[in-house]
Image: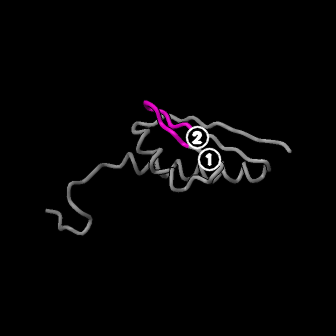
């Protein structure tokens, strides 16, 4: 049986936050860690189509996690009136 393994390394302003945001969506065949300003993910599988689909989903989640962790943090809640 063929074993497929891929590595994805990306650079982020808040890598630990991005990695934590990705963790709930990781499949059992995926591991995501962070160190410094990088996020490192390993994807493994035995079927190329499944690995490609997993990487595709991961990249979409990565883009969203990176975008949302870069948003400004507000001290007020969403439902509070702004002055």
Quarter of the figure with the N terminus: top right
- Say which residue label 2 marks: 41
Give the CA separation, mark 1 to mark 2.
7 Å
Residue ID at (57%, 34%)? 9
Reply above or below: 9 against 57.
Answer: above
In front of the other: 2 or 63: 2
Q: Which residues lie in the magenta part?
A: 32-40
Answer whether residue 33 is magenta in the image: yes
Quarter of the figure with the C terminus: bottom left
Does residue 15 appear left or right of residue 81 in this picture? right
Does residue 32 appear left or right of residue 18 in this picture? right
Reply above or below: 37 against 41.
Answer: above
> Are dots 1 and 2 in contact, CB under 8 Å?
yes
Q: Residue 64: image x %, image y %?
A: 49, 52
Q: Main secondary structure of the magenta part?
A: strand
Q: Considering the numbered disc 2 on the image, is that residue within a helix, a strand or a loop?
A: strand
- Say which residue label 1 marks: 30
């Amino acid at each position: 049986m063929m074993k497929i393994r891929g590595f994805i390394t990306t650079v982020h302003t808040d890598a630990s936050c991005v990695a934590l945001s990705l963790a709930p969506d990781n499949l059992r065949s995926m591991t995501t860690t962070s160190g410094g300003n990088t996020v490192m993910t390993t994807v493994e599988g035995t079927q190329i189509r499944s690995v490609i689909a997993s990487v595709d989903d991961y990249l979409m989640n990565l883009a969203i996690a990176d975008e949302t962790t870069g948003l400004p943090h507000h001290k007020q809640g969403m439902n509070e009136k702004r002055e």
